[in-house]
Image: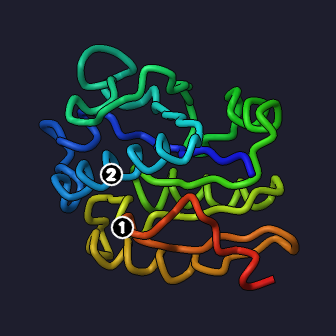
Amino acid sequence: MKQVLVIIDAQQELIEGNETEKSVLHKEQLLKNINLVIKQALESDALVVFMRDKDVANGEGKGFQIHEQINVPANAKIFDKAATNSFYDTPLLNYLKAEKIEHLVIMGCKTEYCIDSAVRTATINHFDVTLVGDGHSTTDSRTLSAENIISHHNAILHGHDNVDHFSVVRNSQEDLFNPIHNNYR
């Protein structure tokens, strides 16, 4: 089975924050978990894709780049996006189809926007998805704490399905590249 790790918006300024935005919740642990899952992906011969949001740091400079503490594999693909949805007007879907990918492991930022839309769009496009439950983060909204947003999404996206394909939520210490979707079919 061909698999890919998709790391969304793990950019320097988004994770660390700036003069108008706070840093994401538990940023140090998020960075450790991203590196752990990258290591798992490489050991499992899974591909690695980074999605970068052009809105972060106005699409330029150090703040726009993948966070400096992330171990970016030399063969990782990096795609830029201009929308919340990583599949909208990007090469991601065509790349996944060309590589005959069946399973996506998704992590990154921000939970209620780019992570949510990627998980849902992937299942719609006939991929099984594993969302790394301790591998995505966000900031407080006006109505919910970041912790509540993350917990809520881990609950509602676990088992989210589109007939034949669905998402499960697992943590970074699990064998993420040994999918468990068939256990539920």
Which secondary structure lies at badge 2?
Answer: helix
Answer above or below: position of 19 versus 173. Answer: above
Q: Position of residue 146 (x, y in %)?
A: 28, 69
Q: Position of residue 139 (x, y in %)?
A: 27, 59
Determine the residue located farthest toward the right in the rendered image.
Answer: 163
**What residue is drawn where x is 25% and y is 44%?**
15
Query: Of residues 85 and 172, which is closer to you in this image?
Result: 172
Q: Are marks 1 and 2 in contact (CB under 8 Å)?
A: yes
Which secondary structure lies at badge 1?
Answer: loop
**What residue is drawn where x is 53% and y is 36%?**
48
Q: How is the image coloured?
A: rainbow
Determine the residue located farthest toward the top in the rendered image.
Answer: 61
- Residue matched to label 2: 36
Query: Of residues 40 and 85, which is closer to you in this image?
Result: 40
Mark carried by residue 67? none
Answer above or below: position of 140 versus 96. Answer: below
Q: Is residue 27 left or right of residue 11?
A: left
Mark carried by residue 173? 1
Q: Amino acid at mark 1?
A: Gln
Separation of marks 1 and 2 at Cα, in angstroms: 8 Å
Q: Position of residue 95 (x, y in %)?
A: 73, 30
**What residue is drawn where x is 72% and y is 46%?**
2
Q: Quadrant of residue 16?
A: top left
Q: Is residue 44 left or right of residue 103?
A: left
Q: Position of residue 136 (x, y in %)?
A: 38, 59
Q: Amino acid at mark 2?
A: Leu
Which quadrant holds the C terminus? bottom right
